[in-house]
């Protein structure tokens, strides 16, 4: 058991750190530290330009195989990349859905034509993607998808009708991947298809959802006979669930240390404020700051354990199942702590418009953390059933 | 980066588990926890003779196995899991660590072979106040030429009434805080020492009181830097905290496992109660706490190894130990409490073992500083730019 990264990995760390120091500056200064969770709608054009800069340096899609333009970087190197990227206050990646979800999915399940048409745009930071999974009645129960896809013999295209919701970056994306019911008589996870749908067409309408923060990161996406080429169905028409679940497995924890670096920046801000405004002398605040520090350190050790125990087959150990519940609960608590450190000032807005400072925004938006991507309740079901082997919930 | 047990470490863990499952059943624990000694001396002999656990951390040049802290926590975790009653913790986590950190060559040569031969050891440092900071060292010494005269009372000493070798912390008369603290090592039979058993709620970790009445020691007994030994004592206690957190981790895991076994069998309203979501969610939270404790303990063990190899400084050790001890204590107590709740009525009977874990959770939480103490220690590092001990 040892904690150190190898010398090769450390020199890789130096390489990316140097590149970021030399390139994330000048015109890109304004996007430093922006565009993360809760702020993904901000400075989108600038962040898209930054994706192209990353590509020029060879820093997009580093985990992809070299034949598709990646570096075939190891899990460790991807972790290091994300950690250094966050340390350098790299902006939220406008291309992350394409790079981490669509690309690996197409590499695993896509046709040659799909790989040829879509992978280069993702790699070069030129085309952007969003995710069409959740629906008003398919949240935790994702298999309850009602959006339907009908093959039109005349046009030889699929026509998609229905509604998706909680779609981040939909207004800024070129394509949405959508799971939709191809067998209209089917229920549950059978009879679904996985489609690559262009956003800019008459059949697609995007409507922002105004959130408790006053901003709109999430959207609703309406499909009304939206058109999709037959060639843009990934896999067979009944394979949607398999592809969709495969996609969720590709992230594999490589961004966890990067996420923790963002959390560390937030905690540092809370600590710095506590020192400035005197709440660092309040014994209860001191206890809670220490508790947050303990929680974040252990989050890192959890990640290192999970990464070290990767089996190589992409299957996460049962210990990895605690990760989402752990970080989301921690972050939500940090939001509350931040408000309590701010004290009465925390209630005041900066101007007449509904403008939040970064800690206020984090306080409010962190309430989403324990809901999206599997609520804490669903996470506890998963842990109980899959990791502890307890009896399963009845499923309709 | 390879943050997992090696094959050899897995073997050490599995061997420890197999030995304890076979030789440390609930009936044996209950028989010996009712005695003043608190453990079975024959069982301790078997640990020393068959398993050689007492030699785990002792370097090879003193006859030990020369293994590291990761191997130690792997063993301690299993001991905690099976409520092993033995003088192991005091002898190794307190005694051997004290010798490794602060012992002179002469002291190591004299005492490590005794511990290897099965002699037991412990540290006495906190007085009647029962605090864990430097101010809790209230026993005093007066230097007279080349000898030291010690007076005072220690309480909360693990196996303090029975250990063969004592490490004592005392302060020079008239000093306070971190100044003036010295460490001494001596046979417990030294003249002027009286010892008494202190009966405890958790009977699996017996404690003693040690009273010094004009105990005269010569310079050979002084460990570390005379009058400046607080820093070394801190290091020793931090190493010991990591060991305790490993025991807590094992206990925490067993609370979850034994609860799962019970609720899978227990049927109400025609279903095993494990099928109810209210129960499942509590178990999921228990697992989160177990796994997070595990990460903290294994990390702290790596830091302890680096500290003992002198590649990591004391600040890293303080942080790792306080994290592991604070989180480990809260988790063990939480899991033991939830464990009782999910056992229902039988959870509060003497018959079921979950109550023994509940008691041990509190005793290990208190010993060497409860979570509040460790969080304040970390808060001082984060917020005050000064060290608080």
Image: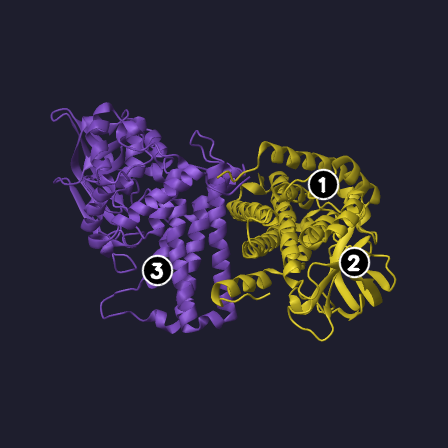
Chain colours: A purple, B yellow
A283 or B157, nearer to the observer: B157
Q: Nearer the viewer, mark 2 or mark 3?
A: 2
Q: Are marks 2 and 1 in contact (CB under 8 Å)?
A: no
How packed mark 2 is, by other alpha carbons closer than 10 Å (few <14, some 14-19, many 20 or more), is some
Q: Which residue is mark 2?
A: B220
- Classify the position of the N terminus of chain A by image quarter: top right
Q: Are marks 3 and 1 in contact (CB under 8 Å)?
A: no
Mark 2 vs mark 1: tell me if same chain: yes
- Classify the position of the C terminus of chain A by image quarter: top left
Residue at point 41%, 37% (across, down): A8
Please state if B132 lies on the left or on the right of A261 as rendered: right
Mark 3 vs mark 1: tell me if same chain: no
**Disc 2 is attached to a residue of which chain?**
B
**Disc 1 is attached to a residue of which chain?**
B
Identify whether B310 is placed above or below A60. Answer: below
- Residue B201 lies, in percent from the top left, at 74, 58
Whole-number angstrom distance, CA of label 2 to CA of label 1: 21 Å
Whole-number angstrom distance, CA of label 3 to CA of label 1: 59 Å
- Residue B51 lies, in percent from the top left, at 74, 36
The answer to whether residue A302 is seen in the rendering is yes
Question: In the image as oriented, which residue stretches furthest toward the bottom?
Answer: B174
Q: Which residue is mark 1?
A: B61
In the rendered structure, which disc, 2 or 1, sits on the residue that comes first in sequence? 1
Badge 3 marks a residue whose secondary structure is helix
Task: Say the numbered circle drawn on residue A364.
Answer: 3
How packed mark 3 is, by other alpha carbons closer than 10 Å (few <14, some 14-19, many 20 or more), is some
Badge 1 marks a residue whose secondary structure is helix
Badge 2 marks a residue whose secondary structure is helix
């Amino acid at each position: 058991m040892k904690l150190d990264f190898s010398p090769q990995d450390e020199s890789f760390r130096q390489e990316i750190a140097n590149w970021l120091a030399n390139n994330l500056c000048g015109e890109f200064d304004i996007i430093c530290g922006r565009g993360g969770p809760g702020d993904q709608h901000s400075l989108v054009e600038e962040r898209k330009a930054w994706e192209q800069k990353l590509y020029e340096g060879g820093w997009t899609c580093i985990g992809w195989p070299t034949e598709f333009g990646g570096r075939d970087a190891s899990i460790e190197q991807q972790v290091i990349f994300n950690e250094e990227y966050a340390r350098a206050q790299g902006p939220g990646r406008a291309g992350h859905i394409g790079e981490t979800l669509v690309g690996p999915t197409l590499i695993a399940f896509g046709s040659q034509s799909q790989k040829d048409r879509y992978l280069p745009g993702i790699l070069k930071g030129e085309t952007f993607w969003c995710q069409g999974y959740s629906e008003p009645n398919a949240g935790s129960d994702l298999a309850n998808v009602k959006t339907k896809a009908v093959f039109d013999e005349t046009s030889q295209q699929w026509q998609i009708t229905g509604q998706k919701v909680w779609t981040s970056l939909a207004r800024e994306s070129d394509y949405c991947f959508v799971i939709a019911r191809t067998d209209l008589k089917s229920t549950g996870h059978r009879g679904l298809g996985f489609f690559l749908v262009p956003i800019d067409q008459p059949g697609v309408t995007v409507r922002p959802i105004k959130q408790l923060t006053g901003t709109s990161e999430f959207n609703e996406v309406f499909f009304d006979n939206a058109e999709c080429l037959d060639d843009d169905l990934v896999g067979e028409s009944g394979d949607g669930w398999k592809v969709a679940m495969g996609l969720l497995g590709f992230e594999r924890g490589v961004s966890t240390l990067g996420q923790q670096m963002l959390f560390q920046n937030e905690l540092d801000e809370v600590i710095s404020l506590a020192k400035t405004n005197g709440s660092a002398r309040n014994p209860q605040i001191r206890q809670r700051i220490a508790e947050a520090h303990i929680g974040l350190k252990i989050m890192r050790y959890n990640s290192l354990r999970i990464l070290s125990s990767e089996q190589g087959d992409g299957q996460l150990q049962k210990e990895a199942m605690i990760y989402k519940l752990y970080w989301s609960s921690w972050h939500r608590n940090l939001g509350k702590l931040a408000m309590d450190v701010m004290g009465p000032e925390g209630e005041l807005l900066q101007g007449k418009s509904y403008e939040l400072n970064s800690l206020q925004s984090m306080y409010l938006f962190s309430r989403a953390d324990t809901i999206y991507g599997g609520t804490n309740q669903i996470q506890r079901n998963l842990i109980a059933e899959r990791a502890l082997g307890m009896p399963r919930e009845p499923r309709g | 980066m390879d943050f997992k047990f090696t094959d050899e470490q897995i073997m050490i863990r599995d061997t420890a588990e197999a030995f304890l499952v076979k030789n440390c059943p609930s009936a044996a624990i209950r028989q010996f926890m009712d005695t003043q000694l608190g453990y079975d001396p024959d069982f301790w002999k078997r640990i020393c003779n068959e398993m050689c656990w007492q030699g785990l951390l002792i370097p090879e040049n003193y006859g030990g196995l020369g293994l590291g802290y990761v191997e130690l926590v792997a063993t301690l975790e299993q001991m905690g899991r099976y409520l092993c009653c033995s003088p192991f913790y005091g002898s190794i986590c307190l005694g051997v660590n004290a010798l490794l950190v602060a012992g002179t060559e002469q002291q190591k040569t004299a005492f490590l072979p005794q511990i290897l031969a099965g002699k037991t050891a412990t540290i006495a440092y906190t007085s009647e106040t029962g605090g864990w900071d430097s101010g809790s060292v209230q026993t005093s010494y007066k230097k007279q030429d080349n000898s030291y005269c010690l007076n005072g009372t220690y309480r909360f000493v693990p196996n303090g009434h029975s250990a063969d070798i004592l490490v004592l912390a005392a302060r020079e008369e008239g000093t306070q805080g971190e100044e003036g603290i010295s460490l001494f090592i001596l046979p417990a039979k030294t003249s002027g020492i009286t010892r008494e058993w202190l009966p405890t709620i958790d009977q699996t970790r017996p404690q003693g009181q040690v009273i010094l009445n004009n105990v005269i020691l010569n310079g050979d007994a002084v460990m570390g830097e005379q009058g400046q030994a607080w820093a070394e004592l801190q290091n020793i206690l931090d190493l010991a905290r990591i060991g305790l957190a490993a025991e807590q981790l094992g206990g925490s895991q067993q609370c979850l496992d034994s609860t799962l076994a019970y609720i899978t069998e227990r049927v109400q309203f025609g279903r095993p109660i494990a099928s109810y979501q209210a129960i499942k969610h509590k178990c999921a939270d228990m697992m989160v706490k177990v796994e997070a404790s595990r990460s903290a303990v294994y990390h702290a063990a790596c830091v302890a190894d680096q500290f003992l190899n002198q590649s990591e400084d004391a600040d890293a050790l303080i942080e790792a130990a306080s994290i592991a001890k604070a989180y480990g204590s809260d988790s063990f107590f939480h899991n033991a409490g939830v464990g009782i709740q999910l056992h229902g009525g039988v959870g509060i009977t003497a018959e079921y073992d979950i109550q023994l874990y509940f008691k041990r959770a509190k005793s290990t939480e208190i010993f060497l500083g409860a979570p509040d103490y460790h969080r304040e220690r970390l808060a001082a590092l984060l917020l005050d730019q000064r060290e608080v001990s």
